[in-house]
Amino acid sequence: MSPSRRDFLKTAAVAGVAVPGIVEGQDSDQPPGTLQACDAGKSVHSVLEEDHPYVYIDSCMQMWPDGDFHLAHRHGVTAYAVTAWRPHFDAAAALDGMMYWHAIAREQEGLEVVRTAADLPRLKREGKAGLLLASQCGDFVGYDLSRVQAFQEAGLRMLNLVYSANNHLGGGCLDRADGGLSLLGQRVVEECNRVGIVIDLSHTGHTTTLEIIDHSAQPVVFSHSNAAALVPSVRNISDEEIRACASRGGVIGLVSWGPLVLKPDMTQRPTLDDFFEHIDHVAQLTGSAEHIGVGTDMSIGTYPIYERDPFGAPAYTAFTARYNELVTSDVRSPMRNIEGFSDYAEIAGVAERLLEHGYSDEDVGNILGGNFLRVFEEVWA
């Protein structure tokens, strides 16, 4: 008889832990400046000797050209919502970025580009991993709505209209004023609904967020945001936004990225228990675990260093300053993620801890991937 999920997770083994080097650089979650090539600090994740039983969808992460793509299907992740290109790219550069991942998937037997929701349980059964192509910024749309359908047909499955700074579609969470969803932004929301692209609200301003939720005919998600009630960062989201998202059937992808878990009274690196407080908060706020997911904002490969433009940059809120001072400012360090979940293979331990924390096996399955899968089934259909 096969072991239960709980029994398996107690004995799950990993191998090959690697620690990235230390390189000082700009924070990874703020609008970047100029790319500076650098080989040090490659992020390498452990390999599970045997896969865990859950469909796990990481709703936000990054991959870089030197990543160990041949091992990506062995880290315990069913689908990586990979940021397919850097924010603020125009349409030509964005298309180049997206097609790069198609080429990677063709080269790697263990990887596929995700097209349909049905791909995800199939990939799990086959021991493969999916690349769920996502954009954290809608700048590439320009003023041409046809690009929404064109990019969907090329494989785009999740889209954030705004990346922190205001653009022609709406307001960003770091900018000085949030004027809400523009008229063009409304049309982009409608096109995403029509062609089947999930709308992501992380990095979006408060007013714009609520207006997108109200305007969308489909559920929307936050790919990597935490509860501002616990950690009052401009990058986290209010209880009002959480309730609004959940009321429409959406999912909040809670993020294990350290700066968004560090509470005002903390002076050291956050832990898995601190992250679980956000899971508990959303579960209590919405009445169940049916609107919770997990987005790590982790990397596979070497996260590039971005230097500020010497001519100056907007004074966006330095929301990572305390973390930089108290824990580490090295954007490639595993300590940028919470203790207990800075390596993908640790997802098996996260699942076991959730069971011990009081969540049912069904709840754990939903948190790790089932809730996002439900949204994908509805929107991508």
Image (cartoon, rainbow, N blue to C red):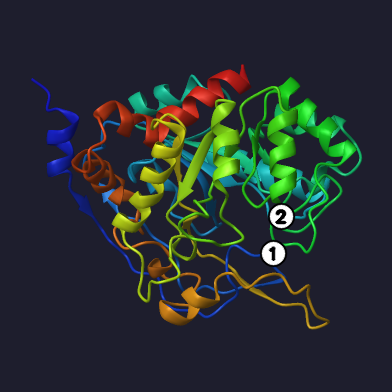
Query: Residue at the spot x=77%, y=31% of the render?
Result: 189
For residue 114, say whether it is visible. Answer: no
* Residue 87 circle label: 2
Crowdedness of circle 1 by 10 Å Cα count: few (<14), some, many (20+)? some
* Residue 62 circle label: none
Q: Quadrant of the C terminus?
A: top right
Query: Residue at the spot x=12%, y=23% of the render?
Result: 2
Furthest-top residue in this view: 381
User: Does residue 23 sit above or below 211 in this rendering?
Assistant: below
Q: Quadrant of residue 155?
A: top right
Label 1 SS: loop
For residue 11, say whether it is visible. Answer: yes
Q: Observer-nearest residue: 300 or 214? A: 214
Q: Observer-nearest residue: 233 or 91? A: 233
Q: Observer-nearest residue: 149 or 278? A: 278
Q: Quadrant of the N terminus?
A: top left
From the viewer's perspective, is the residue at label 1 or at label 2 nearer?
1
What's the amino acid at mark 1?
Pro
Q: Position of residue 148 (x, y in %)?
A: 79, 32
* Residue 31 circle label: 1
Query: Residue at the spot x=62%, y=73% of the render?
Result: 318
Give the tally of numbered discs: 2
300 to the left or right of 45: right
Crowdedness of circle 2 by 10 Å Cα count: few (<14), some, many (20+)? many
Q: Position of residue 325 (x, y in %)?
A: 47, 82
Label 1 and label 2: CA atoms lie apart by: 8 Å
Q: Observer-nearest residue: 150 or 190? A: 190
Q: Quadrant of residue 233?
A: bottom right
Among the two numbered marks 1 and 2 on one chain, the one whose residue lies closer to the N terminus: 1
Residue contact between numbered discs 1 and 2, judged by CB atoms under 8 Å? yes
